[in-house]
Image: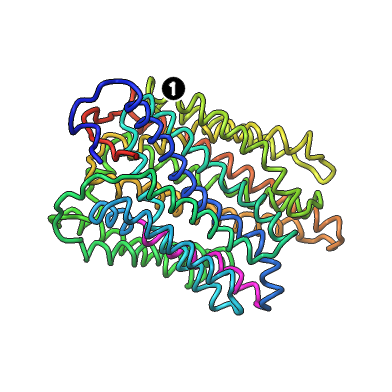
Amino acid sequence: MSTLTDRPRPAGREEQASGNGRWWALVVLALAQLMVVLDATIVNIALPTAQADLAFDDAGRQWVVTGYALAFGSLLLLGGRLSDFFGRKRMFVIGLVGFALASALGGAAQNLEVLIFARALQGAFGAALAPAALSLLSTTFTEPAERGKAFGIFGAISGAGGGMGLLLGGVLTEYVSWRWCLYVNLVIAAIAVAGAFLKLKDEPVAAHGKIDIPGAITAIAGLVSLVYGLANAETDGWTDAMTLGPIVAGLVVLAAFVVIELRVEHPLLPMRVVLDRNRGGSYASIAIAGAGMFGIFLFLTYYLTSILGFTPIRTGLAFLPMLASVMLTATTAGSILTPKIGPRPLVPVGALVAAGGMLFLTRLELDSTYASGVLPGLIIIGLGLGLVFAPTQNAATSGVTHSDAGVASAMINTVQQIGGSIGTALLSSFAATAASDYMVGKEPTQLVQAQAALESYHTVFWWSTGFFVLAAIVAAVLFRTGPLDVDPDAPPAMAH
């Protein structure tokens, strides 16, 4: 099928159909993004049941989560570059099919080893899928107003997917089986693959040089080492050799990666991608906000289940108002205002609003209720996150050449993954320290233990507030004033 730039067309039904095709393409891409984001939290709800079923210890439980994070975070840059080299639609479909098969393997697992292997495979195929989806979105929607709306919807799903995972995981675990938290991906992927063949059409793949093998090796090794060390910090502490060693080694190898990228002819990550102020601001903002988000999903879940006694389903339902408010601001202010004024006013305001919501949660007590104690904070946080996610994801791929769209898209996922890993490690460490400090010299009664847990949640909420304030400051400093740069002559990846 011809692209829009091949020949002039009269306005009318045919033009309208191509516009509708782009919006159907958005549905397909958003569905794939939802699957990837869901898997970050849906398995967490299923883990206790899976642990009892397969009889593995807490260390094994950690590796079910870490295995996915290691593969996903370390392979994203390579996955993004491969989509630039071999075609985004092709990598998108490969990622979908591979993710579905890995999910089927995990759902059928009869022991811990197979489950961890399946989760690592999910992460690997997710690393091919996520940047391909975002770069397809970027090259499909090139007109600023349409682009703002598309990224508003996509950003809403990125911000709300974690909460949806908690709800869906609770429903499936309680009423069906923990295995369906993995099997559900088969259904989502089947719909998305069919939609990809019907509604997506990629640009022709341009001629490229060789893949940067030294860059790929150092990027993967450095990111694996960094994420592994951060994961160990939660259980072993920050001073343990298994924490500090991998973190230091990862930073050294990533520094070597940067040196390589500055010198090779065809770099895996061209520095022009990250040194642009808007893209750099986007990457920095989303990394810091990603660290703060774990204070919401992880530790507020602990509060709802351990203090308020919520079931998994009630916990998932409790997050729905936040998801609604994320979608409200992402698809209205985030999508309408970004093309007109750019991300600089929106992201700092959104991060500060989210910080205000986190600040509200620091007032929670043992006798607080959901309606008066939790709900207002969740709504405020959601309103803020919607203004963070839509503009940053738009800025991450704006003004970039089409040959770099895949790796630019991979970077936004990479920094969010690394930010989440840092947030999990830091906040878990701060929470454990706060709880143990509170218990010093006290009789470990049930009430004292509950109060110690509450103290740890308050500490996390305060730190998450700080993360969001820091994200606001960084965004205000780094983003340029004015609308985003979008190439109006770029041929879109036409939808059928």
> Magenta segment, principal secondary structure?
helix
| Residue 409 position (above or below residue 105) | above
Q: Is residue 422 visible?
A: no
Q: Residue furthest front?
A: 13
Q: Is residue 260 visible?
A: yes
Q: Check disc 1 and report its element: helix, strand or loop.
A: helix
- x, y percentage for residue 347? 46, 31
| Residue 121 position (above or below residue 36) | below
- x, y percentage for residue 427? 59, 53
Q: Quadrant of the N terminus?
A: top left
Task: State which region is magenta.
Answer: 56-76
Q: Nearer the viewer, residue 394 or 95?
A: 95
- The colour scheme used here is rainbow
Q: Residues within 10 Å of mark 1 (few under 14, many from 20)?
A: some
Looking at the image, residue 429 sits to the left or right of residue 344; the answer is right
| Residue 482 position (above or below residue 385) | above
Q: Nearer the viewer, residue 224 or 426?
A: 224
| Residue 32 position (above or below residue 276) | below
- x, y percentage for residue 153? 48, 35
Magenta stretch: includes residue 64: yes
Q: Quadrant of the C terminus?
A: top left
The residue drawn where x is 37% and y is 26% is 16
Q: Which residue has dot 1 on it? A: 337
Q: Quadrant of residue 356?
A: top right
Looking at the image, residue 448 sits to the left or right of residue 386; the answer is right
Q: Nearer the viewer, residue 387 or 248?
A: 387
- x, y percentage for residue 185? 54, 58
Magenta stretch: includes residue 249: no
The residue drawn where x is 48% and y is 67% is 101
- Type of amino acid at the residue the image marks with label 1: Leu
Q: Quadrant of residue 49?
A: bottom right
